[in-house]
Amino acid sequence: MKMMKLSNQLCSTILKHVLLKVHHIFPSLR
């Protein structure tokens, strides 16, 4: 259970970072 929660948190963090990078690379996307 702990491992699952940790991995879930990590996934969400990575997703946030990726989204931020995408927004920086493509500022005219939105």
Image (cartoon, helix red, strand yellow):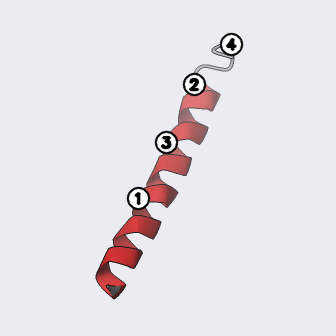
Foreground tag (2 vs 1): 1
Given this view, does label 2 or label 3 mark the residue nearer the observer? 3
| Circle 3 SS class | helix
> In this rendering, would 22 be left or right of 30?
left
Mark 1 or 3, which is nearer the eye? Answer: 1
> Callout 3 environment at 10 Å: few (<14), some (14 to 19), or many (20+)?
few
Quadrant containing the N terminus is: bottom left
State which mark lies toward you, 4 or 2. 4
Q: Amino acid at mark 2?
A: Ile
| Circle 1: residue type | Cys
Q: Earlier in the sequence, mark 2 or mark 1?
A: 1
Give the class, few, some or many, for how many residues have Cα within 10 Å of label 4's Cα (few <14, many ≥20): few
User: Which amino acid, by three-letter code, is at mark 3?
Assistant: Val
**Where does residue 10 sit, x and y in percent of width and height?**
42, 65
The residue carrying mark 2 is 25
- Residue with the mark numbered 3: 18
Secondary structure category for the residue under label 1: helix
Figure check: 30 above or below 16: above
Quarter assignment of residue 29: top right
Which residue lies at the image location 68% right of the left edge and 13% below the top edge?
A: 28
Residue beneath label 4, please? 28
Sequence-wise first label, 3 or 4 = 3
Front in this rendered view, residue 12 or 27: 12
Cα gap from disc 2 to disc 1, whole angstroms: 21 Å
Name the foreground residue: 5 vs 27: 5
Instruction: Answer few, some or many: residues within 10 Å of disc 2's Cα (few below 14, many 20 plus, some between 14 and 19).
Output: few
